[in-house]
Amino acid sequence: MASRSIIITGGAGFIGSHVVRLFVKKYPEYRIINLDKLTYAGNLDNLKDIQDCPNYRFVKGDICDYEMVRALMAEEHVDGIIHLAAETHVDRSIVDPFEFARTNVMGTLALLQAARQYWESLPERYEGKLFYHISTDEVYGALELDCPDGRDCGFSAHKVYGTEFFREENKYNPHSPYSAAKASSDHFVRAFHDTYGMPVVVTNCSNNYGPYQFPEKLIPLFIINIRHRKPLPVYGKGQNVRDWLYVEDHARAIDLIFHEGKVAETYNIGGFNEWKNIDLIKVLVSTVDRLLGRAEGEDMGLITYVTDRAGHDLRYAIDSRKLRDELGWHPSLQFEEGIEKTVRWYLDHQDWLDNVTSGEYQKYYDKMYNNR
Ligand code: NAD
Ligand code: TYD
C-alpha cells in the first residue's frame, strides 16, 4: 500500500499540473489522485509526461459533488488533500459571480465536509491527515501605491512600490467576486479547524507565471498577441502593480508546506518581485521580439490602453518572510530568467495553445475584447 494517498484537486489546471507533476515524480511511494472537472481551464495535455506513472490516477469529477468525493476518499484511503480547484479569472468573475461562489465556496465546503465525514469515521480520526487549501493574496484587498517611482526595501531584491505589504495577520478585504469567493472558502477551511479540529493549512500566494497558464491571464495572453501582432489591451493606465512568482517555485513551496508546515497556520508565498503592469508588458514585448528575431521593441505600438477593469486592485505585494524564516523557502529563479523561460515555452508550444484556445474560450475572448 502507498505510504500516503493524496487527492490534488484542480490538477489539470495551471498550478495544479505543476504540483501533480512534482508529487508524482518526487514521491513514487505516494498515490496521487488528480480530481478535476476539466472546465475550460483544465487540460490533460498539461500532464502527458506523467499520465502513465503507476502512482498516478486521474478522476474526472466536480468538487461540489459531495457523495462522489466522500466515496473517492474511502476507496483510496485518502489522508491528504491539496485543494487547488477553483474558478480563477477576475474578469470572468465580474461577468458570472455565481459560478465563482458555486465552485470556490460550495465546492470547498463539499470537500471539507467529505473529508470530515471520512476521517471522523476512522479509528485514528485526524491523526496523520491534512487538508491543505491553496488561496491567493487577492483576499487581502489592494495596497496603496505610495512610492510610484519604486524604492529599495530590505527584504526584496527588486524595488517595491509602497510602504505596506500583505502579511499573514492582515484582515481580509476582497474586492472582486473572485477574491470574495476565495476569501469565503479560506474562512470555511479555518472554521473546520476551529470547530471540528480538522488539521488544515492555508497558503496565500501572489500572481504566478510560467508554462501551462491558460491564455486569458496577462502574461500568456500578451505573449501570444505579440507573436501574432494583435493589440495588447492594457487596463487603465497600466500602473497597477502585481508581485510575480514562477509557478515551479510555488509548487516547491506547496511541497515544503505540505510536509513541514504547522497545522492551522497560514503562510504567504511571494516572489519579492513587484512590477507595474506597463513595465512588465514592455519586457514581454522586447523578449518576444528578440526571440522571434524581430528588432527588439518593434512591437511596442501594439500596446493599447482600454477601459479599466471594474474594481481593479491597485497593488499587490506579499511579505513572505515567515515562509523564508521558518521553513527556509526562497524563490529559485530571478524574474528575468523566469520570463525568458516562459516566453520560450509559449513560443515553442503553439500546438498546446491551439488546443486550449479552440472552443469556448475564443467566443468569450471575442465577446470581451470586441466590446472594448
Ligand atoms: P486554473 O484556472 O488554471 O485551474 C483551475 C483548475 O480547477 C482547472 O483544471 C479546472 O478544470 C479545475 N476546476 C474548476 N472547477 C472545478 C470543479 N468544480 N471541480 C473540479 N475541478 C474544477 O487555476 P490556477 O491558476 O492553476 O489556480 C489554482 C489555484 O491556485 C486556485 O485555487 C487559485 O485561486 C490559486 N492561486 C492562483 C494564482 C495564480 O496566479 N494563478 C495565485 C495564487 C493562488
Ligand atoms: P491577471 O493575469 O488577470 O491576474 P490578476 O487579475 O489575478 O492579478 O491580470 C494581471 C494584471 O494585468 C491585472 O492588473 C490586470 C492586468 N491585465 C491587463 O491590463 N490586460 C489584460 O488583458 C489582462 C488579462 C490583465
Image (cartoon, rainbow, N blue to C red):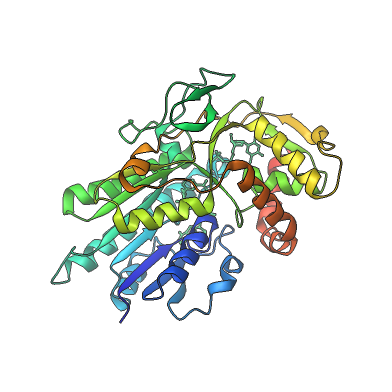
Q: Which image quarter: residue 120?
A: bottom left
The answer to whether residue 311 is seen in the rendering is no
Task: Report the side of 171 relative to 296 (left or right).
Answer: left
Please state the horizontal and vertical placement of residue 346, each as a whole percent of the image: 70, 55
162 to 105, vertically: above or below: above
Question: In the drawing, does residue 87 fall left or right of residue 321?
Answer: right
**The C terminus - image quarter:** top right
Visible residue check, residue 368: yes
| Position in image of residue 213 (x %, y %) | 60, 53
Where's the N terminus, which quadrant?
Answer: bottom left
Residue 367 versus residue 89: which sits nearer the camera? 89
The residue closer to the viewer here, 229 or 149, is 149
Q: Position of residue 18 (x, y in %)?
A: 51, 60
> Percent position (x, y) of residue 68?
36, 70
Number of callouts = 0
- As rendered, which of 92 and 254 lies closer to the eye? 254
Image quarter of residue 349: bottom right
The residue under the point 76% across, 45% down is: 288
- Foreground residue among 360 and 302: 302
